[in-house]
Image (spheres, grey):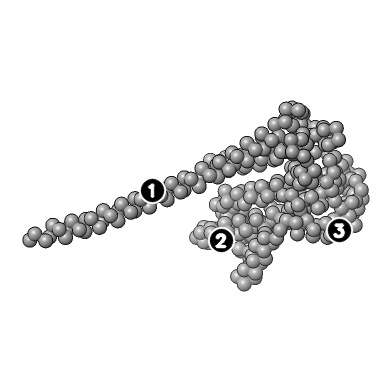
Amino acid sequence: MMELPSTITARDGVAMDTNARGRFGDLVFGMLARLAGWFILLVMVGIVIVLVRGGWQAFSAFGPGFITSTAWNPISNHFGAATSIFGTLVTTLIALVFAVPLAFGVAFWLVEMASPALARFIETAVQLLAAVPSIIFGMWGFFIVVPFMAHYIEPVVTHYLGHVPGIGQLFRGAPYGTGLLSGGLILAIMITPFICSVMTDVFVSIPAVLKESAFGLGATRWEVMRQVVLPWSRQAVMGGIMLGTGRALGETMAVTFVIGNSNRMGWSLFAPGNTIASLIALEFPESSAGSLKLSALLALGAILMIISFITLACSRIFLQRGTSS
């Protein structure tokens, strides 16, 4: 009769020890998770501080005119960001115009129309395309896309659309092959695999009962995609588009090969230009420490961070409005 309490006490001790280890593991895991979150935040804040601090000399020297000025003259130490900002936004917009419909079409075909064996093969090819280094895209664009644009696309488009009132200004200029349109096309090819991969994963994860119910009511394949699939996957699709937008905004080497690298701003898509990333890549090795030119390049980096933040904020607002409606 005296052994029963000792047996119960031993079991209780084992249970208490197990619970203690479990609580300790939860505590350690929670601390590591919080540290990971704070680490990301500290990295972001550190990058912003370095860029703003390094570019403060340029902001102080030129004031708000630094953003609106199109000058870039290292000899006279007169720098402006308007040309590179314009090139960054235009090439990114061109890339999205071509990449989003293409990625959507590929994802829709892989999920709804292609055979399983062919879909696996094409999906693998899409993933391999996403892994190609950007400099390879730049070299391919320089030797293939630029000559093709110069000999076939730009002369024909200029001949038929160059004299049209309004839109004709977008298609004027000498057919060099390099320019904003070529840069946007290379970016479109680069970001399409990222957007397509996200869309494919989202479309596959949609519950089959939703699509089967729509088909049972007599909806066509396009109606199911437009009225069922897209509303259900709106946030994830927008996230994939923003992922591609982020890469397009910050892409460097591929754009540097094909955009022409000219510090001039014009409305023609065939005219050479530059982006913030390409200008920093070209000018940074020639900038001495503490110089106004280096400060201007760091200021451009800070502006690129602000543009990315504004883009992300706008997408969040759009998603919130779409969810509330």
Expressed as whole percent of the image width and height from the top left, the position of residue 110 reads: 63, 64
Mark closest to the chain's N terminus, 1 or 2: 1
Query: Which is nearer the eye, 245 or 163?
Result: 245
Of the 4 image quadrants, the one containing the N terminus is bottom left
Residue position marked by numbered label 3 in the rendering:
148
Query: Which is nearer the eye, 79 or 158?
Result: 79
Whether residue 322 is visible to the viewer of this picture, yes or no, is no
| Element under disc 1 | helix
Q: Are marks 1 and 3 in contact (CB under 8 Å)?
A: no
Label 3 crowd bin: few (<14), some (14–19), many (20+), radius 10 Å: some
Tell me which corner region of the image, top left, top right, bottom left or bottom right, holds residue 81: top right
Residue position marked by numbered label 2 in the rendering:
204
Quote the CA–CA distance across marks 1 and 3.
Answer: 61 Å
Position of 121 compared to 262: left or right?
left
Give the residue furthest to the front. 289
Residue position marked by numbered label 1 in the rendering:
27
Expressed as whole percent of the image width and height from the top left, the position of residue 222 reads: 63, 58
Tell me the number on the disc at residue 162.
none
Q: Residue at x 60, y 49 (%)?
A: 239
Q: Residue at x 67, y 64 (%)?
A: 128
Quote the CA–CA distance across marks 1 and 2.
Answer: 36 Å
